[in-house]
Image (cartoon, grey):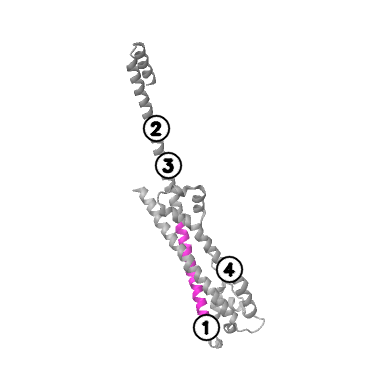
Amino acid sequence: MIKLFRKIRYNLMSENKTSKYFKYAIGEIILVVIGILIALQINNWNALKKQESNNIFLSKRLLVETDKNIIELEKEIISIEKSINSLLTMLHLMGEDYHEVNPKLVDSLIYNILGTPTYYFNDAVLNEALSTGQVSSFENDSLKNIIYSIPTTMETVKFREQNIEHDTNTNLIPFLYNYISLRNVDNQFSNLNNLGKSQVKEIDNRQILSMLFWENEIDNLHYIYSILLKESYRKLDKDLKSLKILLEKQINRNHD
């Protein structure tokens, strides 16, 4: 093809057909420009298809990770609701007539509130998407916004979980060490076998129901547990479920 163009130009010049030569040269330039534009368009199209393919692959991985996070969070929500109910029941039992309360009930409530909420968030794919900047290539602004917001929400979750852990380790556990038999509690409700009852002395764990410190501690824990559930876990649960819907739409749209 190049040889043909050269031959045409040579013939036109040799025949002194200058005007025709210039017209031909202009036409050839136009063809070259058109060829370049077509090549650029093809390159852009290929780059776009590659980006779309990468986005779909990322969306699928994010969806798998999000599904796991939703399942784990729902388990943690059930656990924290159980703790809140135990704390509330304990508050209702407070008073001087604690001898009338079932001792096994008190021990079960103590056992339920000894643990601290800890939500294990899977964020490997999310961190990868954010650190590489690939999230910015998503067209859906709602999808991008919710992905960008989740790390901040998780910071709040962890901060409130740490507050509960600190209060439990600083106030709750040291108090219980002095006034109840944890061995008696574990003997009834833990998975450890053959612990037996306390051999130190006979102690009535119900006595803490008449102590102001215990009432204040349970009241405070009930408050910070409730804040964690309502303002953090619930918000994160809503965000994750919204993210799941948006990712599914993203995947399905590109499959249509």
Write down the quadrant of residue 219 in the picture: bottom right
Disc on the earlier residue, 3 or 2? 2
| C-beta proximity under 8 Å, tags 3 and 2 | no
**Label 3, label 2: how far apart the Cα atoms are:** 16 Å
Magenta-span inclusion, residue 83:
yes
**Label 1, label 3: how far apart the Cα atoms are:** 64 Å
According to the picture, the residue beneath numbered tag 3 turns out to be: 50
Q: Residues within 10 Å of mark 1 (few under 14, many from 20)?
A: some
Q: Position of residue 179 (x, y in %)?
A: 63, 80
Write down the quadrant of residue 159 in the picture: bottom right
Closer to the observer: label 1 or label 2?
Answer: 2
According to the picture, the residue beneath numbered tag 4 turns out to be: 165
Disc on the earlier residue, 2 or 4? 2
Q: Which residue type does callout 3 highlight?
A: Lys
Q: Residues within 10 Å of mark 2 (few under 14, many from 20)?
A: few
Say which of 156 and 179 sits in front.
156
Q: Which residue type does callout 2 highlight?
A: Ala
Disc on the earlier residue, 4 or 1? 1
Q: Which residue type does callout 4 highlight?
A: Glu
Q: Is residue 164 above or below residue 55?
A: below
| C-beta proximity under 8 Å, tags 1 and 3 | no
Residue at point 37% right, 53% down?
249
Q: Position of residue 15 (x, y in %)?
A: 34, 11
**Label 3, label 4: how far apart the Cα atoms are:** 47 Å
Q: Is residue 173 visible?
A: yes
Q: Which residue type does callout 1 highlight?
A: Leu
